Amino acid sequence: MKICLFGGSFNPIHKGHIKIAKEAIKQLDLDELIFIPCQKNPFKKDINYASGEDRKKMIELVLEDKMSISDFEIKRQGISYTIDTVKYFKNKYPNDELYLLIGSDNLLKLSKWKDIDEISNLIQIVVFKREKEINKTNIKKYKCILINNQLFPESSTNFFKGQFDIVEENVLHYIGKNKLYFEDILKNVLDAQRYLHSVHTKEFAIKLAKSHNYDVKKAAFAGYVHDIAKSLANDNKTQARKIIKDYYKDPQKDIQDYQLHQELGYIILKKFAIEEEIAHAVKVHTSLALELSTLDKIVYLSDKLCQGRKYPDIQKIREKALKNLDEGLKLVILKTKEFNINKGIKFTQEQEDIYDKWSK
Ligand SMILES: [Fe+2]
Ligand SMILES: [Fe+2]
């Protein structure tokens, strides 16, 4: 049997990994390709990893024909060294043809790998292309086979920067259900100041939830992610509008500029299958709506009353909101209206109606 080991952090597994796995199966005529998520990549010590168990489950969701997964490295704990993995599988499959699949981005530092000479004697190293320029010296030195694959644009880095479609839908749902990676995503899609505002909003949402007997975890998460689309929407308003119109299948949909990031935020959270209650609070956190849930109010108020916001009487309004949610809402709306009128902003009739209803 021809068996290929494919190690990596798979943090999380994305479509690029699957493309490469398929290509290797085809070009090497493999019987099996084994994904081996590592406990920690010795070269990427500062990256936040989802737990081994979570990364394993996400891989299981996207396995195709002739693909399997081994939790050998996860179970060992600590830093994974390839030599130990190679020896383990050599031992397990003494009579099979074994391959080790690596990306060409590893070629340069290959000579630094622990016991690399022994690795290249024990197993056939196979290299897939990650970039156009390939380090031919090490290919020769370690007798590697080069797979002639098309370059693929997917990478975990791009995922954290907001290219969520490079991850399979069921994996996105797993991430959303288990609330994985949102800290890394927010730190990558928001600038430092906006990230800090997200943390402050989360903190005030926790206070409000505690004061009003609401689910603290839900409020904290909703407050934390409420501006997830702020930069994505601001950086490309045309694209944001298009995504929103496509989502609602309504090319005529009227969307005000200030609504872009709440709408896009909603759509992103729905991609991750985040509960409707949370996604809805994000969807109405700037405009509000004629119908509001407790969480909608908590997120709106946290955004406007959190640390870092400064306007006259804010401390009094904070105290009011902690005692009575609707009273707080009324006061914040009156302030917001006044602020926007002074800025010369005209409200749509719909917005007037919403403000009137909640500030009466
Ligand atoms: Fe916002
Ligand atoms: Fe905000």
Image (cartoon, grey):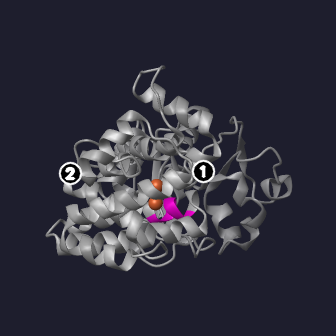
Residue 279's x, y, as percent?
Answer: 32, 48
* Figure check: 215 above or below 261: below
Could you say which quadrant of the image residue 44 lies in?
Answer: bottom right
What's under tag 1, amino acid-wise? Asn
Q: Which residues are magenta?
A: 183-187
Which residue is more in the foreground, 190 or 89?
190
209 part of magenta stretch = no
Q: Residue at x 64, y 65 (%)?
A: 119
The residue at which mark 2 appears reads as 293
Which residue is more in the foreground, 319 or 201?
319
Which residue of the protein is positioned furthest toward the right in this rendering?
137
- Determine whether, in the image, residue 329 is placed left or right of residue 212: right
- Which element is circle 1 on? helix
Which residue is more in the foreground, 204 or 124?
204
Residue 86 appearing in the image: no
Please report contact status of discs 1 and 2: CB closer than 8 Å, yes or no: no
* Figure check: 309 above or below 102: below
